[in-house]
Amino acid sequence: MTVPLDPKDDPDRFDPTRDPVPAGPLDPLLDPDRYAGQGETLPELLGAGAYDDTTNPYMFLLGLVGVLVFLGLVALLFSNLSP
């Protein structure tokens, strides 16, 4: 059996009666995701193996034809199902 959640037990709940904790300087060691890559460019942040390859127009057209064929087959299937 579950019980309803009690908002007074939520530690992140805003409480106007509580004294606010003074905000100190941000520590990069405590939040490495926020401070990762300071001064680096995007290709340097991507890492090894993550690169933007040149696009092949024939693969794009092949994919477009594949999507159109799929949509045609779905339309054909649903047109045969209607009375």
Image (tube, helix red, strand yellow):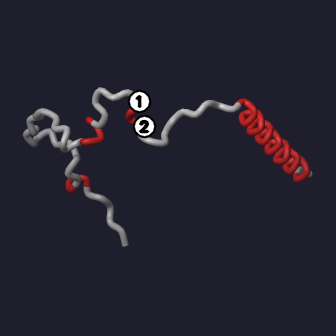
Q: How far apart, in angstroms, are the residues tagged by discs 1 and 2?
A: 6 Å
Report the residue at 36% width, 68% height from top. 2
Residue, far front: 48
Q: Which residue is mark 1?
A: 42
**Which quadrant: the N terminus?**
bottom left
Q: Residues within 10 Å of mark 1 (few under 14, many from 20)?
A: few
Report the residue at 74% width, 39% height from top. 63
Seen from the viewer's position, the closer of residues 75 and 64 is: 64
Quadrant of the rendered image containing residue 20 = top left
The disc labelled 1 sits on which kind of residue?
Leu
Residue 64 image offset from top left, x and y in percent: 76, 36
Residue 43 image offset from top left, x and y in percent: 43, 31
- CB under 8 Å between callouts 1 and 2? yes
Report the residue at 21% width, 56% height from top. 9
Q: Which residue is mark 2?
A: 46
Residue 58 image offset from top left, x and y in percent: 75, 33
